[in-house]
Image (cartoon, rainbow, N blue to C red):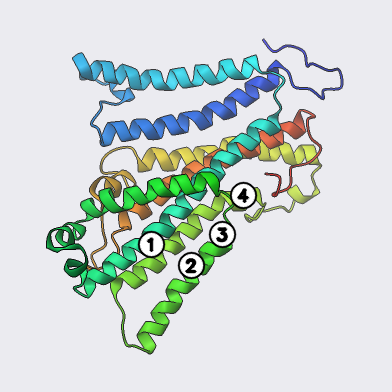
Amino acid sequence: MATARSDADGSRPGTADALYRALALSLGATTFVYLFNNYLDFWQNWPGAVSMFGEAPLRGTALFKAWLQLASYVVTVVAVIVITLRTPERRFASDAALLSSITAYVIATAFWSVFFIGIVDGVISFLRVEGLLPAVFGETLAQRLGVSSFRGAYVHLPLILIAAVVAWFKRGIDFIWLSLLVVVAEFQIVIARFIFSYEQAFMGDLVRFWYAALFLFASAHTLVAEGHVRVDVLFTHFTEKRKALVNAWGSLVLGVPLCWTILGVGMAGKASVINSPLLYFETSQSGFGLYVKYLMAGFLAVYAVSMMTQFLAYFLDSMAILRGQADTYPTPEAS
C-alpha cells in the first residue's frame, strides 16, 4: 500500500512514486533480458522461457536452462521493484536521465558501428571487385572474406565491439554527421559515374546502409527534441499537467506496445524478419555488394530498443510534472 508523500507540499517523492518508477524501469530492464534470451534461444539453441508452458515436457539440462531463462525475467522485475521501494526519495528525473543515457549509449554504439563497418566493408568490397583481395590478404583469407558468415563474425563483430568502447567515451552524436556521410557516399557515386564511368554495387549499398541508419537511429533523438510530427490541434492548448497526462498515457499505451510488437514479431522465431537475416548473415543478391544486409535487419531492433527506453524516459518526465516534481519538461540539452 502506498504511503503518504514525504512532504505536505508534494515536493518530495514517496512510495507511490517508487512504484511508477518501478513500472518504467522494469519494462526497460526486461527488454534487455528479452534480447539476451533471444540470443540464447536462437544462437545457442536454449529451449526458451515459454517452453516451460509447452506441451512437450522438458528434462535434464533443457529443463534447467528453461528455468534459468524464466527466472531471469522474474528476478529482474523483483530486483527493480525492491530497489525502487528502497529508494523512495529518488526523483523521476534521475531515472529518466538514466534511461536517456542508456538510449544515448545504444544509439552511439550503433552509429560508430555503421561508420566503421561501412568504411571497412566498402574497402574490402572494392578490393574484391577489382581482384586485389588475394594480393593484399592472401588467397585463403581472400576466399574467406567472400563468405558472409566469416566477414560478419571476424570483421563486423570486432568492429561493433570497438564501436561499443568508443561510444562509452563519445556519446554526444550529432546526426548531422551521419547525414553528411550519406551525402558523401552519394556524391562519390556521382563523381565516379559521370567523370570516371565507374560504378559498383557496393557503392549504392553504402548509401542505403547509412541512410537506413540515419532514419532509424535518429528517431529516439527526435523524440527527445520534440521533433516528431504531432497532431496538436487540441494538445497545444492544454496545460502542462494535461500535456503530461497525454504524454504519459501515450507513452505507455501507444509507444511501448509498438516497440514490443516490433521486437516480439521480429524475433519470434528463426524465420522472423529480424532473427532470420542475423542468424544466416543474409546479403544482397548483387554479388559484389556490401555484406551488411543482415545488419540492416538489426536496425529494427536498435530502433525498437532506443525508442522503448526513450518512451519510458518520456513517461517518467511526464510523471514528474503530474506528481509535482517539475513544472515543465526538461530541455533537449538537459535530457
Residue, disc 1: 118
Q: Position of residue 324 (x, y in %)?
A: 80, 29
Q: Compare residues 89 and 237 and report the one nearer the observer.
A: 89
Q: Residue at x 26, y 48 (%)?
A: 153
Mark carried by residue 223: 4
Between label 2 and label 4, give the one nearer the viewer.
2
Q: Amino acid at mark 3?
A: Phe
Within 10 Å of disc 2 (Cα), the crowding (few <14, some 14-19, many 20+) is some
Q: Viewed as shown, does residue 83 lie left or right of 140?
A: right
Callouts 4 and 1 close, C-beta under 8 Å: no
Between label 4 and label 3, give the one nearer the viewer.
3
Q: Amino acid at mark 2?
A: Leu
Q: Helix or strand or loop: what does disc 2 sit on? A: helix
User: For residue 201, what is the image quadrant?
Assistant: bottom left
Q: Position of residue 156 (x, y in %)?
A: 32, 52
Residue, disc 2: 181
Between label 4 and label 1, give the one nearer the viewer.
1
Q: Compare residues 43 and 113 and report the one nearer the observer.
A: 113
Q: Helix or strand or loop: what does disc 4 sit on? A: helix
Residue, disc 3: 175
Q: Would residue 249 be visible to someone looking at this image? A: no
- Residue furthest to the bottom in view is 195
Q: Residue at x 70, y 49 (%)?
A: 333
Q: Would residue 44 be visible to someone looking at this image? A: yes
Q: Earlier in the sequence, mark 1 or mark 2?
A: 1
Q: Amino acid at mark 1?
A: Gly
